[in-house]
C-alpha cells in the first residue's frame, strides 16, 4: 500500500475507533491513531498466525480498527482517565 492509502485507511479506522471508544482528537489524531492501530493490529494478527493489513478490503479495515481501539484504550489507561468502565 502507498502512503496515500495508509493515510486514508488510517484516517477512517482512527475515526471509527474514536467513535467506539469516545476518545476524539481531530483528523490528524485520527489518522495517526489509525495508522499506528493498523500496524498494531497487523502485529497482533501475525502473532496469531494470520495476515494483517493486506490492502483495500474490509478485513484489513477491521484489523486497523481493532488495533486503533486497542491503542486508544491503552492511551486512556496511561493518561489515568479510567478504562472503558467510566464510559460504559
Image: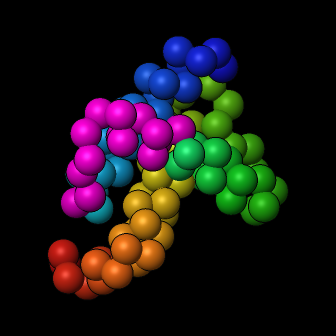
Q: Does 21 sit left or right of 11 as displayed?
A: left
Residue pushed farthest left? 87
- In the image shown, does 48 or 74 lie closer to the viewer? 74
In percent of width and height, residue 2 lies at 64, 15
Q: Is residue 58 above or below residue 17?
A: above
Look at the magenta stretch and give its main secondary structure.
helix
- In the image shown, does 20 or 83 lie closer to the viewer? 83
Q: Is residue 28 magenta?
A: yes
Q: Is residue 9 magenta?
A: no
Q: Quadrant of residue 60?
A: top right
Question: In the image, which residues are magenta?
Answer: 22-35
Location of the N terminus (image quadrant) = top right
In percent of width and height, residue 82 lies at 30, 83
In percent of width and height, residue 77 lies at 40, 77
Q: Does 79 sit left or right of 22 as displayed?
A: right
Q: Which residue is rendered at x = 56% and y = 45% of the image?
A: 36
Regarding residue 63, the answer to whether it shows in the image is: no
Q: Which residue is rendered at x = 29% and y = 51% of the image?
A: 18
Regarding residue 68, the answer to whether it shows in the image is: yes
Q: Quadrant of residue 22?
A: bottom left
Q: Is residue 87 above or below residue 25?
A: below
Q: Does 24 sit left or right of 33 as displayed?
A: left
Location of the C terminus (image quadrant) = bottom left
Tell how many labels. Answer: 0
Q: Which residue is rendered at x = 37% and y = 74% of the image?
A: 79
Amino acid at each position: 500500500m502507498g502512503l496515500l492509502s495508509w493515510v486514508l485507511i488510517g484516517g477512517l479506522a482512527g475515526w471509527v475507533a474514536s467513535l467506539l471508544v469516545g476518545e476524539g482528537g481531530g483528523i490528524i489524531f485520527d489518522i495517526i491513531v489509525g495508522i499506528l492501530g493498523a500496524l498494531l493490529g497487523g502485529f497482533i494478527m501475525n502473532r496469531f498466525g494470520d495476515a494483517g493489513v493486506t490492502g483495500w478490503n474490509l478485513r484489513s479495515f477491521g484489523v486497523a480498527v481493532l488495533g486503533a481501539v486497542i491503542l486508544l484504550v491503552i492511551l486512556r489507561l496511561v493518561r489515568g482517565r479510567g478504562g472503558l468502565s467510566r464510559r460504559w
